[in-house]
Amino acid sequence: MKAVSPLISAIFLIGLAFSLGVILMSWLNEMGKEKGENVETSGEKVIQCTLAKFKIIKPLLKYNFSSEPYINITIYNIGKTELYNFSFSVITKKGNMLKSYIFAPENQKTKSQPLKPGEIWAFNIIPKNDKPSKEEELYEISITAICGEDYIVKNSIKIER
């Protein structure tokens, strides 16, 4: 049996290393492009959601708690992105103590039917179970919404007496 000459084996090893390098570089390039696109897409969503804003148009409140209470709130999307899954808190004051009651509108805006930029949306809430007592005074209404997948946008309005 004859052995492979050192020159041929060196050329073979260099060729093998070069081939593996090309394959590895191609794979890393594709993986880098994919990761870069994911970062770019999520970065755009975060930037859009930092521009998400809504305005609470003065709410109409009938909240004396002795008869049927209701809250009518109108929201104006003044931001640059869609909002959905609204919830709001009615914050009351009794002496120096603050208490929060959380409500969700019945005609909720969803991810498939969001509040689009420039749109106005009005909703009514008639609290039935967990509602403030007669001694509590309305202090503030705080509203949250979701932008994108999980970015929360908040706004509140103090109730002037």
Image (cartoon, rainbow, N blue to C red):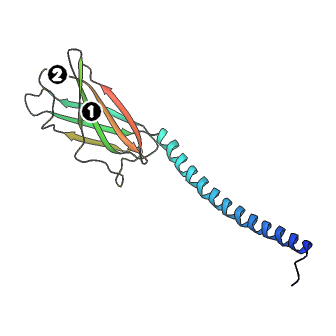
Q: Farthest residue toward the front?
A: 1
Q: Quadrant of the C terminus?
A: top left
Residue that appears at 20% across and 30% down: 61
Disc 2 target residue: 136
Q: Is residue 53 left or right of residue 22?
A: left
**51 vs 39: above or below:** above
Residue that appears at 59% across and 54% down: 35
The quadrant in which residue 94 appears is top left
User: Residue 8 location, x and y as percent?
Assistant: 89, 75
Q: Quadrant of the N terminus?
A: bottom right
Element at label 1: strand
User: Residue 7 location, x and y as percent?
Assistant: 92, 72
Residue that appears at 32% across and 51% down: 110
Mark 1 is surrounded, within 10 Å at the Cα level, by few (under 14), some (14 to 19) or many (20 or more) other residues, namely some
Disc 1 target residue: 89
The numbered mark, 1 or 2, whose residue comes first in the sequence reads: 1
User: Residue 58 location, x and y as percent?
Assistant: 29, 30
Q: Nearer the viewer, residue 58 or 90?
A: 90
Gap between marks 1 and 2, in whole Å? 14 Å
Q: Nearer the viewer, residue 108 or 40?
A: 40
Residue that appears at 24% across and 15% down: 96
The quadrant in which residue 32 appears is bottom right
Q: Amino acid at mark 2?
A: Glu
